Amino acid sequence: MSNRQADDTSQPTENSLLLFQASAADFKKIPGNPISYWVSQRAVTLFASGRYLSDISSPRQGLATSDDQRFLRLWHEVSINDCALTTSEDNKEDRALKKWIPFVKGGAVRRWYGNNEFIINWENDGSEVKEHAESLYGSVTRTIKNMQFYFKEMIAWSLISSGMPSFRWQNSGQIFGHKGPGLFSTSNLDLRNAIGFLNSKVTSYLLSFTSQSLSYEVGAIQKLPVLEALPEVDSITLIDIAARDWDSYESSWDFSNLPLLDTDFWQPSLYRTYQKFRSHWHKRTQEMQCLEEENNRIFIDAYGLQDELTSDVPLNEITLTCNPHYRYGNDKSEEELEALLLADTMRELISYAVGCMFGRYSLDEPGLILANQGETIEDYLKQIPEPSFMPDAQNVIPMMEGEWFTDNINIRFREFLRTTFGEAHFKENLAFVEQALGKDIRKYFLRDFYSDHVRRYKKRPIYWLFSSPKGSFNALIYMHRYQPHTVGTVLEYLRDFKDEKLKARKDHLEAVSISAGTSQGDKTRALKEIEKINKILAELDDYERDVLYPLATEQVEIDLDDGVKANYPKFGEALKKIPGLS
């Protein structure tokens, strides 16, 4: 055996003694017979007990579609009315009426709750997926495994991880995949105690001997040694905190409104609102840390591993998005972390504001408002008859360098900020946003907003940017509100900008350049701007003639069920290029 005690990471360190003594017979007591030379005698005893997790539970591998691009979508791509996102295990009728069902796929390191992003086409009880498996392999069950466990509540984990193992609670109503396997309850196992065990340091320690490649296969989970009875722990609170954190962001289908705008935190000053909100986040992270450390203590004591492990949990392992140590890594100063968190929170405020501009969200009602294909402003007003912030009626929001249109996106954001925080502190609040971003709001929209949006929605954006080759003309649309005439509306904006506003500006400058009462410096500046406008007009003439007008006459149809990857390229050079989509 080792002549030292294992440290918290269960791996030898540079400062450890490098001499180890181990019995080959002990290796055989560990499932898979790994060469885990740092294994302690207590760990060997636990593995040799002969009582494993598979004896009291059902860890299972799930479904492989054999064609994810065909059968899977990110949940925000399709019409929300076609999704059964929250159903009970027995609620077969509601699921039968919908096409899309939640699909557990693994994902980033996150404990307790989250990574609920994908949906699967399960129309007619998954007939297309099953027919595809049959055509490829001659058997449905070769890739569509353990169907008797579908739609049950479970504990999920990521099959492959670049970091610590992380187990998450999954409510009933989902299908689990081969890269997001599941652990299911039996009469001998309470899943809430099981997730406490699985997310404890004890499990990480035991898996370090059997899963040294960071691939957490079902077999390795099955062979985790368990006690006669797992201790009872407060996993419900841990799951609840993690779920509230996950649901605070647009990436969650249970996102209802922006927490920053919650009345519990609201102050006339955005700065003071953020400070109050940030304090709440800090307390939430601290509470999570204390609960996780208590969870560790319970299982370390129960397993008799006090000599091998401590209960401490570093902040970067508290997997809440509101925790900057986890979100941005532990290699930055507190000042840097706080600056990153503030900037991202302001980006989230802006993203939510744009959602309100398009009617996806409303300040007056929680949750999604317009999120089905082809919905209109009339559909919005049926739900919100007297909105405090009116969405754009035409589903086109110009995003221009100058404020050429009264509905330009930066003007509309200013309206949103006045609506949510009032007029008295408006200038102070706008300055706070711009300071956090490191640039004024106009530049942010022109340079960063769309790339942030594409990143937030994982290269499946819901707002699409019509953009001329050099970016002189830009206009956003919301894909769920898209109709075949939408490109024609964008074309109207382009023509208004080009033929009315730019040419009027050019006429004015030409008058300035020849006026006897104009100074030479003003004439020179006018001539330079005329030259710039001429180049813009040439760019926009080409964009209209070669791209936008032909597209408008084509009256392109889309089907949200096909996904962004299929629909976005239909608009060719009219839309901002996105690697992997265009």
Image (spheres, rainbow, N blue to C red):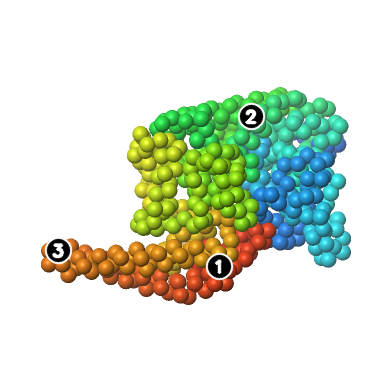
Which residue is at a point 64% across and 41% down the rendered structure image?
254
Sequence order check, earlier mark of 3 and 2: 2
Q: Label for residue 518? A: 3
As drawn, 42 above or below 565? above
- Categorize mark 1 by other alpha carbons within 10 Å: few (<14), some (14-19), many (20+): some
- Categorize mark 2 by other alpha carbons within 10 Å: few (<14), some (14-19), many (20+): many
Q: CA distance from mark 2 to mark 1?
A: 49 Å
Q: In the image shown, does 321 or 395 lie closer to the viewer?
A: 395
Q: Position of residue 171 (x, y in %)?
A: 73, 39
Q: Secondary structure at mark 2?
A: helix
Q: Is the residue under label 3 in contact with that under label 1 (CB below 8 Å)? A: no
Q: Label for residue 571? A: 1
Quarter location, residue 481: bottom right
Which residue is at a point 36% across and 35% down the rendered structure image?
425
What amino acid type should be assigned to the residue bearing mark 3? Answer: Thr
Q: CA distance from mark 1 to mark 3?
A: 46 Å
Q: CA distance from mark 3 to mark 2?
A: 73 Å
Q: In the image shown, does 63 or 47 lie closer to the viewer?
A: 63
Q: Position of residue 225 (x, y in %)?
A: 79, 35
What amino acid type should be assigned to the residue bearing mark 1? Answer: Phe
Q: Secondary structure at mark 1?
A: helix
Sequence order check, earlier mark of 2 and 1: 2
Q: Position of residue 565 (x, y in %)?
A: 62, 62
Quarter location, residue 484: bottom right
Q: Which residue is mark 2?
A: 292
